[in-house]
Amino acid sequence: MNILKSLGTAAFVFAASFSGSATAQSETHDIATFISGGPTGTWYPTAAMVSDMVNDTYLGQPMTTIPGKGAVGNPLAVASGGAQFGLSYGPFLKLAYEGGNEVYPDAGFDNLRAVANLVPNTVHLVIAEGVDMDILSKLSDGATVRIGVGQKGSSNFFAQEKILMEFGYDYAALEAQGSSVVKGAQQGLADAFANRQIDIYTNTVGTNSGDMQQAIAARNGRVMPLPEKVRATLVDKWGYVPSIIPAGTYAGQDTDIPTVNLATVILTTADMDDEIVYRAVKAMAENHDRMIEAYGGFKRWKPEDIHVGLPIPVHPGALRYFKERGWM
């Protein structure tokens, strides 16, 4: 009798579980296109995984991932209705929302809304041994630098010019006073640093990455801490997120290093319905292992940071989940 009762209980639990799954997939949704990056990068598999998890909760697999034009182009695509969701970087999303700036000179897209903050990339400036750690502060006194800043249009190129502007220089002014500004792909900059052609190597990349370790080892380098005034401007004006590189992250680093993170943000528009946004955020926050499966960089992401540093108004569907978890 007890055996039959146990079997009956097990059958009920299985049926209830199956019924719950069926209920979750009993709804349909209009097609929601998710615009990402190129198919060979990390944004495409990230968007594809989010799409798969959302589609698990709907009939008909409404969310479709497509390649996009990246951080600058994707907000335009979403704001204009060419896609319903997209990926961008926090600073570019903020500039798109505001408009009237160097990246988006026309009126801003105030219909854009933030959904989630994903894997952070950290702004690094590696100073070669023998170079004054305060060299940027001494530019106005006649000091010169040799700095590598990335490719024009890249997130690193953008970040380094905003940092230099806080010391009174853009790239043109820096070159005009006798400094050397080297632009190009990151591997070329790393080689130039190792070969002593530049003395400051910069990159916006995950902490403790092989790229940064190699640069530091090549010239016994040190990571420059950003002054608080510079950090505050990058956060308040440009949409970066305050960050600390913990002591011990790099060889010879015995103190915490203040810097900023470049947030990777999922965006949508204000008129996107709350439920699909809620499901997307819930899926990401509660399936960390699947996010890591899509891109290994999610190992350094914490689901509870999904709401941190969003540079434009948050979509109500995302806000609903954040409040449920006590994060906002």
Image: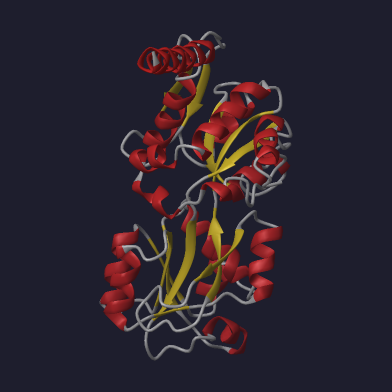
Q: Quadrant of the N terminus?
A: top left
Residue 150 in view in this figure: yes
What colouring does the structure picture have? secondary structure
Q: Is residue 264 above or below residue 259?
A: above
Q: Is residue 93 above or below residue 111?
A: below
Q: With 81 as the anchor, is 181 left or right in this view?
A: left
Q: Position of residue 79 (x, y in %)?
A: 64, 28
Front position in the image: 210 or 3 = 3
To which quarter of the image does residue 185 belong?
bottom left
Q: With 100 as the anchor, is 11 left or right in this view?
A: left
> At 70% from the left edge and 43% from the top edge, which residue is drawn?
312
Front position in the image: 156 or 289 = 289
> At 44% from the left edge and 42% from the top edge, which residue is drawn?
288
To which quarter of the image does residue 7 belong?
top left
Q: With 130 as the anchor, is 274 left or right in this view?
A: right
Front position in the image: 9 or 173 = 9
Give the total of numbered labels: 0
> At 27% from the left edge and 69% from the top edge, which residue is drawn?
191
Q: Position of residue 57 (x, y in %)?
A: 50, 19
Residue 67 in view in this figure: no
Q: Position of residue 67 (x, y in %)?
A: 41, 29
Q: Is residue 260 above or below residue 89?
A: below
Single out the residue that lies furthest toward the front.
1
To which quarter of the image does residue 76 belong?
top right
Q: Position of residue 173 (x, y in %)?
A: 57, 71
Q: Is residue 122 above or below residue 248?
A: above
